[in-house]
Image (cartoon, coloured by chain):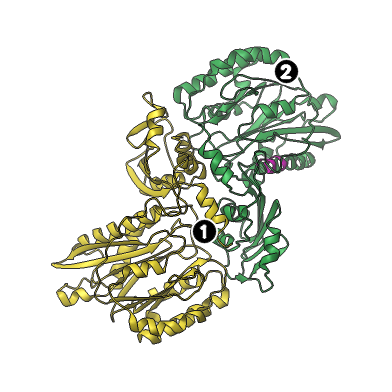
Chain colours: A green, B yellow
Amino acid sequence: MGKVSSVSPFSPTSLAKLPPIDGVTFATAEAGIRYKKRTDLLLAVLAEGTTVAGVLTQSKTASAPVLLCRKHLRKGFARALVVNSGNANAFTGKKGREAVDLTVEHAAEAVGCKPYEVFVASTGVIGEPLDAGKFAHLLAGLAERAEPDAFEKAARAIMTTDTYPKLATRKAIIGETEVTINGFCKGAGMIAPDMATMLSFIFTDAALPADVLQDLVSEHVQTTFNCMTVDGDTSTSDTCLLFATGAAAARGQKAITKVGSKKLRDFSNALHDLMRDLAIQVAKDGEGLSKFVTFNVEGAKTWHAARKIALSCANSPILKTAIAGEDPNWGRVVMAVGKSGEAADRDKLTIWFGPYCVARNGERADDYDEKTVAAYMKNREIEIRIAVGVGKESATVWTCDLTHAYVSINADYRS
Amino acid sequence: MGKVSSVSPFSPTSLAKLPPIDGVTFATAEAGIRYKKRTDLLLAVLAEGTTVAGVLTQSKTASAPVLLCRKHLRKGFARALVVNSGNANAFTGKKGREAVDLTVEHAAEAVGCKPYEVFVASTGVIGEPLDAGKFAHLLAGLAERAEPDAFEKAARAIMTTDTYPKLATRKAIIGETEVTINGFCKGAGMIAPDMATMLSFIFTDAALPADVLQDLVSEHVQTTFNCMTVDGDTSTSDTCLLFATGAAAARGQKAITKVGSKKLRDFSNALHDLMRDLAIQVAKDGEGLSKFVTFNVEGAKTWHAARKIALSCANSPILKTAIAGEDPNWGRVVMAVGKSGEAADRDKLTIWFGPYCVARNGERADDYDEKTVAAYMKNREIEIRIAVGVGKESATVWTCDLTHAYVSINADYRS
């Protein structure tokens, strides 16, 4: 079996260093919502005129904060973001809405903005009423001491079973002006984003209207967060918000008003790259993982079909445990392709584990050498490529293996 | 955590005793295909005129034996069934077809029948070429010593990681004649039947044409095998065959020629009951299980929606590990309902663990007592009832929990 430790083997030796972004400040607090001796409350204060776009879970049992964000996104402006960890405020009925309302009220007063400019996200246990009284009174103090150079602190405050904070930064050029994009997010279980990852927040100083932001985030979430899974379990709280303070306008950034403007190409690429980076960081901190696994599916009829086949592999318990056992059991890849329901030509199916072709044209490759491929499986990062032989489209999905530690973490989560 | 042992805690203290069925005989052998010192080859010899119907996996990477059965089912007659364990003969290309052809040829000669009257099924490792030369020559000898009172022996020969054979028997009345239905099947991992369970064989002495049999088996498989899952991984080999020798005609059973005949009501009920019994036995021997779990979903718009919601729960790793941990984490039920994609009214959602209502109308039940429900979770059999509040249809799905032992079994399966 791959080695499992209390910290992900992919925990970075040094975290990405995020520069400040004009118009974005953070403060955190230990509110004691569930965790002891660590921060669990985050307030982000955003400059006047900040625009916002986002995507939220498609779960039919979405949390109270998700419903609030959905409503406030219609206006497209943001001045405050409040995030707590330790309690998801999901399936909490009327009490859940009241907790969100209390949070919005205090945040709006603390920051001096309209209620619809406040966004809220919560992560943690589902079904437990969230006592917003525990932290709403702290927001005024947080607003006073919010500081710009605090992305890492912010990322740490929203962690649950994550073993490291996920941070990423990129530069992009709009017209002739350089802008910055910073983002952070959290995993680490109940992760199979169906519109966004558990919680992901991205900030830029670019000056972009909300509809332009929405177009970008909606497009890129498909090939980044929505192509990543830990356990196939879509959370009630998935939230990905993109805030643009517009500070770059003062530095000469020309206004962009049109969705799909060619001037956005570099920004769009940088944003995609950053979202992909964060998604991979989540998979690399999947609960109890010993290995990071990439499934590349090619030769499918559509991108959607390729993604569905890759996800069928990435969510297969019997395949994920084989990978944990360092067993090159490619027969289970065949099974997962078959059960996906998408078109695949069994007699053209070809599979590679890393550089080694294990199956070609519907049967075991003639030159397959079990020892060589078994040695490859000892790697911490495993890449499985699958050609399904019916078309020209491809997709990539990132995931991790399924280990004893996943069972332990989730059997004991609340006790 | 629930206790896990090398044998399922649901292993029956005494196996069902199946009476002989006129026109059905069995012989088994130790062919050494993969397992040592146990039987791994089964030949069933069926009387002349035996009709057959069946359902097979919908996997796009179906095994060579599945393709053969699909072809032979069109004729509707059977004289021989050959089953081997230890190798699935799936994803074995031309060699796979040749292995099946060799088996059919020898079986037809041994029994004295047409090739299209031979049915073949294989279970075990995927992708490994099956050397039918190892056992085809044994079939003539098996045909000679086939005996009627051997259902248990037959069930044992087709086991893989099963810890006990799954057997069931029922009596039914057609017109004024009593007939017998016997069945056996195997699990125990890669089980999420998508048309039938891994391998399931049912025999009756009733005299029924193939189209009548097909109608019955197609109907009942939906609410029995297709409502059972171990790990959500649909096999390449799912096969459920129903053989009717017609011996009851000699005892006066009147001919039934019409699909849906009212005279079949008792037989249909008994068949459904037997298939349900076998499906539950498979779930109760799920790989590494410590608990048997039933999800009852009610108040859905359609039966299909109710089943999909129940399966979303039954296949959720994070919920199944919580159950293994004896944690009444009903928030994860909320998550699984939400991710199913089927209509559910979050604010009417009501959930029971056994007799205890844990959530009512979209939030934690007022009278919820964690200690009481945690004590309930110590039971070996857990029943979770979910009312989704949008309609009148219901469905039941059977499964087991996800334990360390599942990970161990599947990480080490081939080593």
Please provide the residue range marked out in magenta. A277-282
Left or right side of B311 for A249: right
Name the residue at the left extreme: B176
**Mark 1 neighbour density, 10 Å: few (under 14) some (14–19) many (20 or more):** many
Q: Which of the two residues, A93 or B328, is positioned nearer the viewer here?
A: B328
Give the residue number, with chain letter if any, for mark 2: A146
Residue B266 vs A201, above or below: the answer is below
Residue A280 highlighted magenta (yes or no): yes
Give the residue number, with chain letter if any, for mark 1: A339
Left or right side of B179 for A218: right
What chain is tagged by disc 1? Answer: A
Q: Residue at left 33%, top 55%?
A: B12
Query: Can residue A335 be seen in the rendering of this structure?
Result: yes
CB under 8 Å between callouts 2 and 1?
Answer: no
Left or right side of B23 for B131: right
Judged by its main secondary structure, the magenta piece is: helix
**Which image quarter is the C terminus of chain B in?**
bottom right
Q: At label 1, which amino acid type do we have?
A: Lys
Q: Which of the two residues, A299 or A334, is positioned nearer the viewer here?
A: A334
Residue B185 highlighted magenta (yes or no): no
- Coordinates of residue A414 in the picture (x, y in percent): 51, 32
Of the numbered discs 2 and 1, the one sitting upstream in the chain is 2
